[in-house]
Amino acid sequence: MNIIPYPNYHSCRRLDPKRCTNYRTIRGEINGKPVKLRKALDAKGNQVIQSILFPVEHWSASQARAACRKGTFHPASGVAEKVAPGREPLFMADLGAEKCICRRCRVLVSKPPDTPCSALTCPECGKPLEAHTTYQEEE
């Protein structure tokens, strides 16, 4: 189950995800800006856009809200960090925060208090997140 809002995307949920199957995410554009379109099959087997994800680096909350004409708007909860493959971050902006990581996409997400990482999913691929601990690389 995805936790909304996503940390690095504003979202526009057009259909309840429980009413859809066979998801896939494709890149698209709205007003010349990048978006991710989450396509799925509805109960009748028709291909529909279940939700639209607006990357925070290209969309303010007010711009994304205006582009969300049909559906429920959710502003981003914060900004996730991207981790280079094979390397852990040496510095994080909020050292006191607990983090979760997607081992597939290398997306690092701040974890809400009293929520295990395994209950969260990656905003990029939807896979379950794992607990992340930082370390200082030896030189």
Image: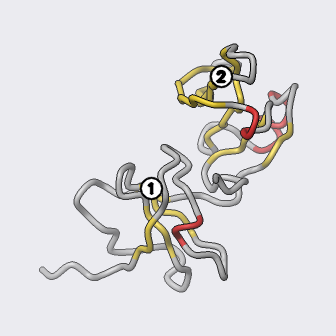
Q: Which residue is mark 1?
A: 107
Residue 138 coordinates in the image, percent (x, y): 15, 82
Q: Position of residue 114 (x, y in %)?
A: 66, 82
Disc 1, SS: strand
Q: Quadrant of residue 12?
A: top right
Q: Residue at x 48, y 62 (%)?
A: 129
Lower position in the chain sequence, tag 2 or tag 1: 2
Q: Is residue 24 left or right of residue 43?
A: left
Q: Left or right: 130 with respect to 26?
A: left
Residue at 83% over, 41% down: 73
- Tell me which amino acid carries mark 1: Val
The three-letter code of the residue at mark 2 reads Leu
Q: Position of residue 134 (x, y in %)?
A: 36, 79
Q: Nearer the viewer, residue 15 or 138?
A: 15
Provide the residue designation for mark 2.
Answer: 41
Q: Are marks 2 and 1 in contact (CB under 8 Å)?
A: no
| Mark 2 → mark 1, Cα distance in angstroms | 27 Å
- Pointer 2 local density, CA inside 10 Å: few below 14, some 14–19, many at least 20: some
The image's colour scheme reads: secondary structure
Q: Residues within 10 Å of mark 1 (few under 14, many from 20)?
A: many
Q: Give the image location of residue 78, x and y in percent.
A: 65, 60
**Residue drawn at x 22%, y 59% as measured from the top left:** 86
